[in-house]
Image (spheres, helix red, strand yellow):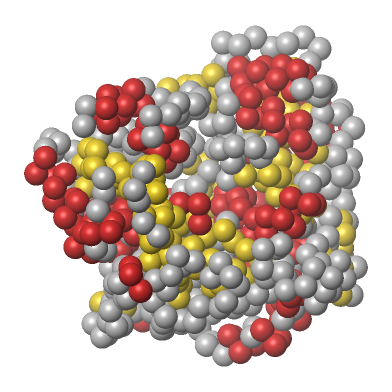
Amino acid sequence: MSEDKSPRHAAEPQAADVSEAQIAVHWPEEGYFSPPVQFIAQANLTDPGIFERFSLEHCPECFKEFADLLDWYKYWETTLDASNPPFWRWFVGGRLNACHNCVDRHLASHRNKTAIHFVPEPEDEAVQHLTYQELFVRVNELAALLRETFGLAVGDRVTLHMPMVPELPITMLACARLGVIHSQVFSGFSGKACADRIVDSGSRLLITMDAYHRAGDLLDHKEKADIAVAEAASAGHQIDKVLVWQRYPGKYSSPTALVDGRDVLVNDLLAKYRGRRVEPVQMPAEAPLFLMYTSGTTGRPKGCQHSTGGYLAYVTWTSRYIQDIHPEDVYWCMADIGWITGHSYIVYGPLSLAASSVVYEGVPTYPDPGRPWRIAEKLGVNIFHTSPTAIRALRRSGPDEPTKYQYHFKHMTTVGEPIEPEVWKWYHKVVGKGEAVIVDTWWQTENGGFLCSTVPAIHKMKPGSTGPGIPGIHPVIFDDDGHELPSGSGKAGNICIRNPWPGVLQTVWKDPDRYVKNYYARYCKDPKSKDWRDWPYLAGDGAMQAADGYFRILGRIDDVINVAGHRLGTKEIESAALLVPDVTEAAVVPVADEIKGKVPDLYVSLKPGLSPSPKIASKISASVVSRIGAIARPRRVVIVPDMPKTRSGKIMRRVLAAISNHQDPGDVSTLANPEIVEKIKGLAEGE
């Protein structure tokens, strides 16, 4: 795959030319990379005419193609019921079951094909290869247990607090089989965070695991369940039972004792249900499938409610045509199922297509940065999906490791946040070995699946740009006053979606007013209108559109720093810092300033073996000024040994902002590395 040296677009306007209602953008356009011929030859989607079929004029009926990828007990009567905007109802009148679509329907042709490759973190433990037949048996037995022992029925909610083990998708699918709404909480979250979600969802049952491996340790996970139950009780909500899976069946691996009368070992109970079969419940298309809570730093978490028919149709179509998944592919999404990416693109999307999906228990860099590439080599992974956070970590800890292993990716996805061009190029050249096509996808928890991306066999790739809206998605950029910013303007604003789509959340659980206020109220043209065209969806991200129609995401609107009336995107400043070869990670936070309002502080970590020095800090600051301008010059560059990170690897910028502003960073106990906070404080105060 070669870089296309197409002429770059005209220079971006200087900050002084940009109004306060827009975000100043100084990030130059990159050249193009073309998809390889061999990829195009086998791709699922090569017809550029699809964009005409999915034009705005053909919405919403065009989404019939999405739903036609599924098995239906009863075909739907109405593609989109928009009679109560913005509470969209998709494929109304249709009945289906998500578990049937992900398991049962594959048995005729793929019974003995691997559905899930489970890779334990300890390398001396064998990989488990769970076939579709085994998945069918295990899901049925668990569904029978949940229904008959615990009385679960359609519409009940169950909270799962489980790590990356095969029992997690088994439990999700068993719930879906019964029409029970599951709410999975990321295993790295505290017992208190789990309790908040239990209380909000009204779950009476908590399903967890005794222990799991992470970074070389067997962690006690059961203790969080006890905290969650106690915290829920203090909020006036009673959990009836705690179901505990054993990481090693037949052996209890937690030092936290079981509570008599409340806690039940799932593995012991399952023996009673050997061979049991449960018919999938025929669910209305608009019935909720699951709740996925966003983890805001303040306020009550939002329970994003996703539907059965619309959501499943959306993730199936996008998995097939944007990730190019075929049944014979071995696909590895290196996210956590505790996030929406894992729901959509580890469980429901790939399994709906009869793919083989990899579930890896532990840390990508354990015991060394070669681990992901050994896994890919061993399993024959040919589609790889991860986040810029993970890519940066792998680039930092083992920049040459991928070259040591015999794996070959045809396709790679990046998701979760904008990826800096320099990091993209390493991903393409070193991880992809120049052979793989990359889709840089943009979407959110609320969206169900991808919103913007290049279609891998149709579009050229451009580092730093997510590409256009996928077929059926029609983005638009508004300024703060609701005026549309055209492509090629060099100006950025708030990215919105003009039309409803099947994967979008139905509502915020138990809080419809919050749903309307957060996502639709700002740019609604007429609150009394029943025309979906008057209800654009506000994503909450800043973005700009280049002349070629590709979108560049600049981070959350909240992450914009207003410096002396100029709104600077933090992602752009971070990208400029990463142009310095010494830098592996960068994080920008706003600091209050009496004169300018806000100024940026820039935190960076360096490649292994390099020592902090004023010379390196000056070089980084100069790079920002050179790329963006003096208006973006950091107040200071703080070189740190590591960033404060969540268990999923995301940099906690709010902690850094608190340090810079001499505020209390709050509870940092749930960080992967809480000890780093005091070290950073010392470095920042010593500046």
Residue nearer the viewer, 358 or 529: 529
Residue nearer the viewer, 646 or 128: 646
Q: Is residue 421 above or below residue 281?
A: below
- Residue at 66%, 30% in the rendered image: 194
Q: Is residue 181 above or below residue 420?
A: above
Q: Can residue 277 be seen from the camera position used here? A: no
Q: Quadrant of the C terminus?
A: top left
Instruction: Give how far across and how far down residue 303 sits, in percent.
Output: 71, 45
Q: Is residue 603 above or below residue 437?
A: above
* Horizontal relation, residue 556 to residue 506: left or right: left
Quadrant assignment, res 190? top right
Q: Quadrant of the N terminus?
A: bottom left
Quadrant assignment, res 254? top right
- Residue at 13%, 51% in the rendered image: 619
Count of numbered tags = 0
Residue nearer the viewer, 133 or 121: 121
Q: Can residue 293 be seen from the camera position used here? A: yes
- Residue at 22%, 38% in the rendered image: 639
Residue at the outermost front position: 595
* Horizontal relation, residue 77 to residue 376: left or right: right
